[in-house]
Image (tube, rainbow, N blue to C red):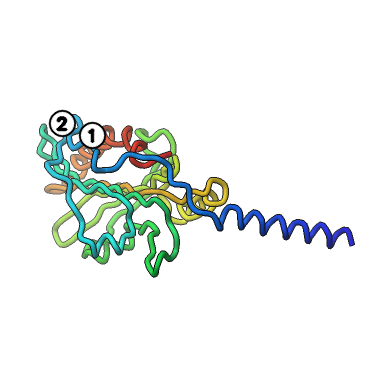
C-alpha cells in the first residue's frame, strides 16, 4: 500500500515537473541585435552585412543573424562569418522547424565535399570544443570552423547540443542558441595561411559574441 502511494506521488510529482517546465513558454534573455554588430574589428572590415532571402530564412528558422565577408586590411585575406541566433528551438512551429541545422548536413547540398573533419579544444577557447573542417568543390578548398554557442556553452557535437537543450529547457526554460561558423578560402594550398587568418579574426569576434548570444 505504502509502495503504491509512493509511486503515485512520484508520478504526480513528475507530471507537475513536466507541466511546470515543459508546458510553459521559453525564457527569452535580453541581447543585442546583430544590426549593431561592429563591421570593423582590428584590421578586419566587412563593407556591408549580407541579407538572406526569405526562403532561406524560413528554412533555417533563425531569429537573428550575422552574415559578413570580413577582409583583412593587412593581408587582404577574406573570411565569411555566419552567426545564426535562434531565440527558441522546437521541433515544429506552425508547420516549421526552427532547430539549428548541423553544417555537415548543409555543405554536401551546396556541392561541397568534406575531406577532413576533427573536433578540437583550441588554446584560444577557455572551455569547450569546436569542429575544424576542410571542404572541397572542384579545385576550390576552404577551411571551416564551427560550433554551437548556446547558453554559455561552446559545443562541437550535435547530439550534445540537443542533450543540453533539453536539460536547459527543463531547468531554465531556455532553448535559445546559435551556430557560429567561419569559412576561409585556402589559396594555392596555403592551409596554414587560412588557419592564421581564422585565429586572427576569431580573437576579435569571440570576446563580443556573448552580447549577441547570451550566456
Q: Which mark is residue 49?
A: none
Which corner quadrant of the image does residue 61 belong to? bottom left
> Which quadrant of the figure contains the C terminus?
top left
Q: Nearer the viewer, residue 104 or 96?
A: 96
Report the residue marked by disc 2. Answer: 43
Tell me: 126 left or right of 110.
right
On the image, the x and y values in percent for residue 79 come to: 19, 44
Q: Nearer the viewer, residue 186 or 202?
A: 202
> Dot 1: few (<14), some (14–19), or many (≥20) neighbours within 10 Å?
some
Is 47 placed left or right of 13 in the picture?
left
Tag 2 and tag 1, C-beta contact below 8 Å: yes
Q: Nearer the viewer, residue 189 or 105?
A: 105
Nearest to the eye among marks 2 and 1: give it.
Answer: 2
Read off the residue under disc 1: 200
The residue shown at (83%, 59%) is 5
Q: Give the quarter of the figure containing the N terminus.
A: bottom right
Q: Position of residue 25 (x, y in %)?
A: 50, 53
CA neighbours of label 2 inside 10 A, class few (<14), some (14 to 19), many (20+): some
- Gap in Å between the C-alphas at discs 2 and 1? 9 Å
Question: Residue 120: x percent and y percent?
Answer: 38, 44
Q: Measured along the vertical axis of the image, is residue 44 above or below residue 170?
A: above
Residue 123 is drawn in which quadrant? top left
**Which residue ends up furthest to the bottom in the rendered image?**
95
Report the side of 209 relative to 171 (left or right).
Answer: left
Which is more N-terminal, label 1 or label 2? Answer: 2
Q: Secondary structure at mark 1?
A: helix
Identify the residue at horizontal 28%, vertical 49% (top origin).
65
How far across and how far down the image is residue 45, in percent? 14, 37
Amino acid at each position: 500500500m505504502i509502495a503504491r502511494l509512493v509511486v503515485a506521488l512520484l508520478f504526480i510529482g513528475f507530471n507537475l515537473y513536466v507541466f511546470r517546465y515543459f508546458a510553459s513558454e521559453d525564457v527569452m534573455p535580453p541581447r543585442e541585435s546583430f544590426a549593431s554588430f561592429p563591421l570593423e574589428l582590428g584590421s578586419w572590415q566587412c563593407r556591408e552585412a549580407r541579407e538572406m532571402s526569405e526562403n532561406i530564412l524560413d528554412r533555417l528558422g533563425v531569429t537573428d543573424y550575422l552574415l559578413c565577408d570580413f577582409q583583412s586590411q593587412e593581408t587582404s585575406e577574406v573570411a565569411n562569418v555566419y552567426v545564426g541566433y535562434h531565440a527558441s528551438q522546437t521541433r515544429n512551429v506552425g508547420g516549421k522547424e526552427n532547430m539549428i541545422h548541423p553544417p555537415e548536413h548543409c555543405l554536401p547540398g551546396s556541392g561541397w565535399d568534406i575531406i577532413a573533419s576533427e573536433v578540437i579544444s583550441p588554446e584560444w577557447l577557455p572551455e569547450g570544443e569546436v569542429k575544424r573542417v576542410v571542404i572541397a568543390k572542384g579545385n576550390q578548398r576552404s577551411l571551416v570552423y564551427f560550433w554551437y554557442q548556446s547558453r554559455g556553452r561552446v559545443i562541437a557535437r550535435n547530439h550534445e547540443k540537443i542533450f543540453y537543450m533539453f536539460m536547459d529547457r527543463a531547468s531554465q526554460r531556455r532553448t535559445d542558441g546559435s551556430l557560429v561558423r567561419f569559412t576561409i578560402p585556402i589559396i594555392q594550398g596555403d592551409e596554414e595561411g587560412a588557419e592564421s587568418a581564422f585565429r586572427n579574426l576569431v580573437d576579435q569576434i569571440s570576446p563580443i559574441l556573448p552580447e549577441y548570444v547570451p550566456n
